[in-house]
Amino acid sequence: MSREVVAQIDPTDEARAAADEESGTAAQPPVAAPMESMAEEEVAGESPADVPPPETAAEALPAGPLPTFATPSNLLVAVGANETISVLTDEGWREEVQITTDGNTSLGACNTSGAAFFDAAGRPWVGCSNLTISEDSGATWNEVDIPVQFIIERTVIDPYNRIWVLEMNTIRIVDPDTRRVIDTFQASDVTGEDGFPTAALAFDVEAGLAWLGGLNTQGSDLISVSLDGEAWETYGDLSDLGAEDYETPGALLVTQDGDLLIFTGKDIYTLEDNKLVSQLSQDQLFELSAVYDAIETPDGTVWIAAVGGLYEWDWENLVKYGIAHGLPSETINDLTLDSEGQIWIATNYGVAYGTQELGVISFAQPGYSGLRDSRIVAVAAMGAPTLPAEEPELLATVRGRLVLDGAPVANTNVQLCGEPGSDFFQETPCEDQIFASLTVTNANGEFVFEDVPIGTLGLAAFQPDVGWEADLLRNVAVPQAGAEYNLGDISLEP
C-alpha cells in the first residue's frame, strides 16, 4: 500500500498554499475513515478463539468513532512507577493483583511510559514497556506480546478502538479484540526522518488526523498523520513554528471546537496557518513548568497536569491547585474523567479526585489505602468509582545506619519524605509533603522508621557542622506491606 510522505513545512510551502487557496485548488483536510486494507502482522501469543482475525484492517474497525460504552461496573485503574497496578472496584481495593508478562511479573518501565485505558468492550489495558490486558475487572493481567524493536514509549487508544503503540522509530496499530498488529509505520518510510516524537498523541476525528508531539532528536517535534495512515506531515522543531529553541511539546489536546492545543514548559499554543499562536498572557508564561497531560471538561474548561500542580484554564484565567487545596502532591502526572464528570488525578503521592469545580477533593494516600505504589503515573476510570470510607493499611519498616568516614554518625536527624527527588529548596527536605517522618540516630548511627507507607520515598539526613544535605541521600523503594527493609550503611559526604 502506498503512503504519501509530505515534506517539512517551510515558508515556500505557505506561499504555495496561499496561491492554491486563491485559485480555488487548496487541498482539503483528510476525512476521518477507517484504515484501508493493509497487511496484518501476526502477534506472538494466543488471541481469543471465538474472535476470527480480520482479513483487512477495515474489517476490524467500525464505520465511525465508537460511542462511549455502557457498563454496570465502576472501576479505577492506577499504574505505579514501580511497575504496579492498583484496582478499585465497587467492593473496594483489590487485595491481590496478578501480573504475568512473558512468564515474569513485570510491567517494564512505567515511570516514563505508563498508560491506562479501557477499550470499547470495557476491558482495562495498561501500557508500560509491556502491554497488558485484564479480562476479569483487573484481578489478573496478561501480556499482549506484540513485536517491539526497542521499547514502548507510549500507548494510546483512539476513537476507532485501535491501540497505537509508539516506539522511538516505529508505530504499530493493534486491534484490541484479536490482539493483532493491523498496521506498522516506520519513521523513515512515512516521514523521511529517523524517529517519531512520543511524548503526546491526540486525535482530531473531524479533521481526520492524529497529532504526535514531543522532544524528537531524530526528527520533527510535531507530526500529523491522517487517520487512514496515508498522509504524513512533519513540522520540524517548535522553533521553526515560532517558539523558543528550548520548547518542546509536553502534552497535546484537541478541543471540542477542533483547536489543537500544544503545551510546553513556557506556554500554551494553537497552530494557525502553520504558525504557533500564544494563548497565555505575559504574566502567565512559564507558570506551567513541565506539562504531562491535559483534558477538557464538557463546559470547555481545560485541566492541565504539570510538575507545579493542577491547573484550570478557561482560555483567559490560569488557576493553580495544590496541596493547600487538598491534593496529596503538586506533581501531577495524568488526568481522566469518569462518567459523572469527576476528575481523577494521578500524582507523585497517590490518587485524588474532585468535581469539575474542584470544590471538594478526596484522595487515596499510599500506605492508608489499597494503592500499591506512591508515585502514580497513569489513571483510567470506567463508570463512576468512589473511594471507600475505610481503607486497608499497607505499611512497612525501614532501618539503616549513617556513617561518615567509616565512623557512625550518632544523635543526628534523619527524615523520610513521601516523594522521592534529587534536591529540595525548603528549610527541611519534607516540608509541604503529606508524609514526613523524622527520627534520630542512636549511638551506633542506627535509625529506624516504623509505619512507613509502601511506595518510593526519599531519605535525607542532617549532617553535623553542615546542616541538612542539599541532596536527598537516596530513594527508598518499599514495595511490600508488613516487610522490613534494611538499607545497611549509608555514607555521608565529608
Image (tube, rainbow, N blue to C red):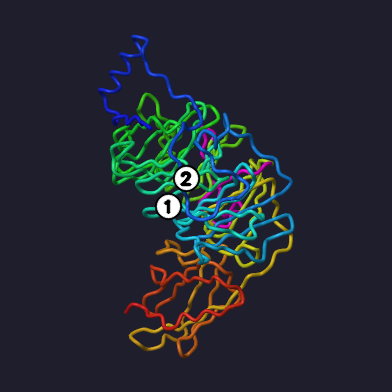
Q: Pick the residue in front: 179 or 207.
A: 179
Q: What residue does disc 1 label?
A: 147
Residue drawn at x 32%, y 18% is 17
Give left or right: position of 131 versus 492. right
Which of marks 1 and 2 precedes in the sequence? 1
Q: Pick the residue in front: 207 or 376.
A: 207
Q: Quadrant of residue 249?
A: top left
The answer to whether one can see residue 92 in this image is yes
- The amino acid type of the residue labelled 1 equals Pro
Residue range highlighted in magenta? 314-339
- The amino acid type of the residue labelled 2 equals Val
Q: Position of residue 46 (x, y in %)?
A: 54, 54
Q: What residue does disc 2 label?
A: 181
Q: Is residue 318 magenta?
A: yes
**Residue furthest to the left:** 12
Q: Position of residue 321 (x, y in %)?
A: 56, 48
Q: Is residue 244 above or below residue 418?
A: above
Give left or right: position of 54 versus 190. right
Q: Pick the residue in front: 393 or 177.
A: 177
Using the image, tell me which numbered label, if any, was put on residue 450: none
Picture mark count: 2
